[in-house]
Amino acid sequence: MNHIGSYVDGFVFTLFGQRKGWSKQSMRFEWKRLLGFSQDDVLGLDIGSSSVRMVKLARENDGFAVVAASISDIDQTDGDVDAREDNAVKAVQRCMASARTRARWAVCSVSGPEVAVRHFNFPPLQPAELEGAVRLEASQVCPFNVDDGVVEYQNIQNGATDNVAAGVLVAATNQVIQRKVRIVEKASLNCVLMDVDGLALLNCLIESKKDGSQMNSSAILDVGASCTTLAVMGENNLPFMRTVPYAGNDIVNQIARDNNVSPEVVKKDIYGSTRPTIPPENLRPCLENACQKLISDVAETLRYHSAQAKSSPVEQILVCGGFGMVKGFVDILNKHLPIRAILWNPFDTMRCSVGRQCLDVIQVNGPAMAVAAGLAMRSV
């Protein structure tokens, strides 16, 4: 069962195999009735390449409260796909045990080169014609065969748009979706919605900035182990995002080569080992040098966004993701980028309604859990 959802202008769409005559809203209600779950039963589950992050939130009048949160590293192996998936399943199970939650319904997400989010702009079309036009557009702009994947779209109202059909399309390969669903199901959970990392990040920012302050002037930079996501919400309500393949693992590997040590040694050193192998006075220049390609990619992407988008220029970068917490990384971004970069913990504006263990998780690892928080905020 293929299903992918995303946030655009406050709307979540879900592919459960749409039936003729059903609206997406009525589909969502019908599935919730048949499967017997409520919003309170749903958690955000971010399954990355190096760790799993899980967040459960409760909606309050003035925002969200954290009900449960946990993070678990995925054991790395050079084995086959099945072995890597099994390690991810075990990490999900450890998260569930640590969080002590009985929730069994998860909102997950996909990212990387097998996922695409693009704008579209067509003359006025009938609904049946629009669906075909969107799929044709996806086949031309996506870097993969859309016939082997899922394509969905959402119209965006940007004011006087009677003479144009504008919106956002989301596409992902069946393979990347099915892999996440298999991991979730093997962990005895049910995936009720599949989102996109970049859209989940923007959703998290929107929910945490209800007054709209700095939302349109902020970019989110999520630096993970295997890929980096840059996301911006424009004043026209159209999300802009790019996935950069250069990320934490690439930086770590370059530092390891420069110092003739293993990547495992570098990871311990950059995350604050009490007995570093690489002297700190050598590690900082190596880190700065290894970050140059990422900095160049981010700067180029921001210039492209500024040239294309009809919105205010980006004034600050909210840095998150596991690698974003590396000591000195944000300082390096501030040194080389023309706009301010700050480490973003989305939980700073949320109340934690449970014990000390959960509070410790979101205080220490909050920036790494921004995608999971955005997923947990979804209405399903």
Image: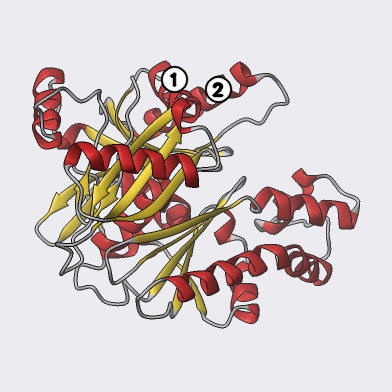
Q: Quadrant of residue 213?
A: bottom left
* Tag 1 residue: 182
Q: Residue at x 47, y 26 (%)?
A: 148
Q: Measure the alpha-carbon separation of dots 1 and 2.
A: 8 Å
Q: Amino acid at mark 2?
A: Glu
Q: Secondary structure at mark 1?
A: helix
Residue 67 can be seen, yes or no: no
Residue sitting at x 80%, y 57%: 255
Please indicate whether residue 63 sits to the left or right of residue 260 in the image.
left
Please state the horizontal and vertical placement of residue 50, each as a whole percent of the image.
58, 39
Identify residue type, mark 1: Arg
Q: Is residue 251 left or right of residue 159?
A: right
- Residue 89 visible? The answer is yes
**Image quadrant containing the C terminus:** top left
In primary-sequence order, the first of circles 1 and 2 is: 2
> Where does label 2 land, which residue?
85
Residue 35, quarter of the rendered image: top left
Disc 1 + disc 2, Cβ < 8 Å: yes
Judging from the image, the colouring scheme is secondary structure
User: Residue 200, percent across and down?
Assistant: 35, 50
